[in-house]
Image (cartoon, helix red, strand yellow):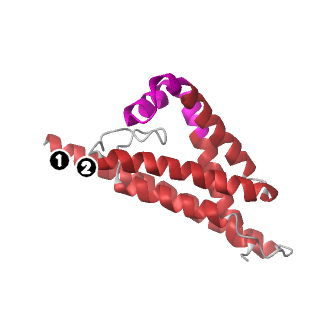
Amino acid sequence: MIDQTFQLPIALAHSLLLISAGRHKLRARPRFQASLAAYELLPGFLLPMASRGLPVLELLIGAALLIPACWPVAGPVAAALFSAYAFAMAINLIRGREAIDCGCGDTPQPLSLALLARNLVLVAGAILLTVPDASRQLGTFDFFVIAMAFAGLALLYIAFEQLTSNASRLKEWRENA
């Protein structure tokens, strides 16, 4: 069993990530479809459907993660989605195709082992949501802890994204210098 003060910040962070990623992908669908095509894993006729369906799936999972009763289903689905993304990244890294935009967010980022590791951490977090919680009444301090943990996770994610973005820019700068 696991305490809700541990699971709730993870669920909120995953929800925020999935909802913002799904929203971005729907707004920039041509770019996302181009990213999917660059992975060279799907047949061309599936790309339009995948570029619409994956963001909608992300939005649905993100919304479901806001409801603790949905975690037993949404957690494994989120883990499967993050695993699929990690698998696609791994295949292309093995192929030596790291210049591909991951398709993850607003700023284009080439594939890297760091992004692969990030997705594996996200898989682990999603799986933790499937562990039964030690049901107890949450108090005021618990909500403070949950809010601070969520803020900490969000800041860690933002810092990680900035570091990986900076690393790819630095690598590009060195190659062009």
Label placed on residue 170: 2
Q: Quadrant of the N terminus?
A: bottom right
Residue 107: image location, x then y, percent: 43, 39
Circle number at residue 30: none
Amino acid type, residue under disc 1 in the picture:
Arg
9 lies left or right of 95: right
Q: Is residue 144 above or below residue 40?
A: below
Horizontal side of residue 16 vs 87, given as left or right: right
Q: Which residue is mark 1?
A: 174
Q: Quadrant of residue 43?
A: top left
Please tell me whether residue 37 is drawn above or below residue 131 in the rendered image: above
Which residue shows up at 75% across the image and 53% down it? 66
For disc 2, the neighbor class at 10 Å (few under 14, some 14 to 19, many from 20) is: few
Quarter the C terminus occupies? top left
State whether the magenta stretch is mostly helix, strand or loop.
helix
Q: Position of residue 8 (x, y in %)?
A: 71, 64
Q: Is residue 100 left or right of residue 30?
A: left
- Residue at x-position 38% and y-position 32%: 38
Q: Which residues are magenta?
A: 22-48
Q: Is residue 155 visible?
A: no
Q: Say which element carries label 1.
A: helix
The answer to whether marks 2 and 1 mark residues whose Cβ atoms lie closer than 8 Å is yes
